[in-house]
Amino acid sequence: MKAIATRLASCAIAMLAAIGAARAEDVCQAPAQIDAEGAAPAPRTRVENYRPIFEQCRNGAGALRLAIRRFSVDGSSLMLTVDPATLATSLEHAKCWTCAETDEAAQKDTRFIRAVEAPSQHAISSAKEPGVTMNAGLSHGQGEGSFITGDLCPSLRPLDRAFLEKLAALGPHTPVALSISGLWLMHHWADFQWLRRQARAGALEIAWVDHSYHHPYVPGRPPGDNYLLTPGVDMQAEILETERLLIANGETPSAFFRFPDLVSDEALTEIVRRDHLVTLGADGWLVFAPPLRPGAILLVHANGNEPEGLRMFSKLLDNGRLPRPFRPIGEAP
């Protein structure tokens, strides 16, 4: 009887091990999903030990990713990864990947690092404030069509849903890059959840572009002493805290960062590069833009603060004057 009991115990242990292995394999079949359906935003502290890294990773199927952040959520060890060929980001379970540290020199031939390290295309240096730059980074895309981007700066006004519904009416999975600030998300939870529903339903294909957490701005203050150039601003915290908040609330940050009002300097853009993000500019705010050509990166504000720009977008769209097709921002670099 004792021998039978021992064999039964061994079988039970083997079965539990097999079940555990099967569950682990199931977890590795798809990117991690963070549940976020509460009545209010989850705090960014839900995402613990969030830190920049740069590692080359492969999984059991041989897929290659570059991991740029490590962290944990609800006890699970996760990574924010970038596909070095497509620039698509995903949240992955760390246990499903074998990773080793890498560097920019080793990855210099990847499309991702070429985009991160590319010189600014149409940056303008301020004549009045030496060192201040407008529109650094990627301001015009490759190929045909154009790239729609909408900024979500902190605002007292609601999301302009009509603009986004007009985009959705163009066809399923219409791509739009939304530059989101942390404070906008915190104060526009219903609008954020509405956007998530549009994406889940396949109406829109949203890329979440980091637009800083606080988006500091003081009316009337010169650019060199304003926005992220405001004295005392912690630039890396502005980047990472927005990413943490997005992840805590069920979304995946993209590989792009847009400066508030497109204002920066070399020190700030170097921090963006160091954190392995692509600085995103624009051909110009649509209300000020020159005639648009293929590859245009269109900039409007979808946060309720720029009705004139959205009216202009609608007019140009209806008159067939926007370069088509509209393409995902990951195809721009």
Image: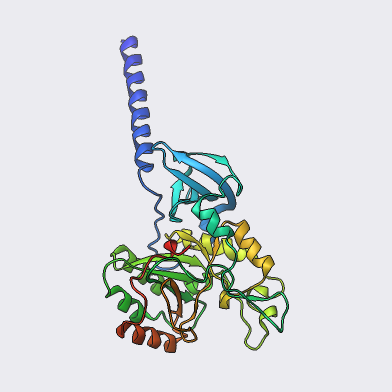
Q: Against 98, is 181 above or below?
A: below
Tell me what residue is drawn at x 31 percent, y 79 percent.
Answer: 166
Q: Position of residue 2 (x, y in %)?
A: 34, 11
Does 19 sit left or right of 222 as displayed?
left
Does 233 sit left or right of 262 as displayed?
right
Q: Against 273, is 184 above or below?
A: below
Nearer to me, 252 or 111: 111
Q: How is the image coloured?
A: rainbow
Tell me what residue is drawn at x 38 percent, y 42 percent.
Answer: 28
Which image quadrant is residue 312 in? bottom left
**In this orientation, does residue 71 appear?**
no
Give the total number of marks visible in the rendering.
Answer: 0
Q: Position of residue 75 (x, y in %)?
A: 49, 47
Q: Against 148, is 157 above or below?
A: below
Q: Quadrant of the N terminus?
A: top left
Nearer to me, 176 or 127: 127
Nearer to me, 137 or 201: 137
Which image quadrant is residue 300 in? bottom left
Does 319 sit left or right of 280 as displayed?
left
Q: Position of residue 135 (x, y in %)?
A: 58, 74
Nearer to me, 18 or 150: 150
Q: Position of residue 122 (x, y in %)?
A: 57, 73
**In this orientation, does residue 28 appear?**
yes
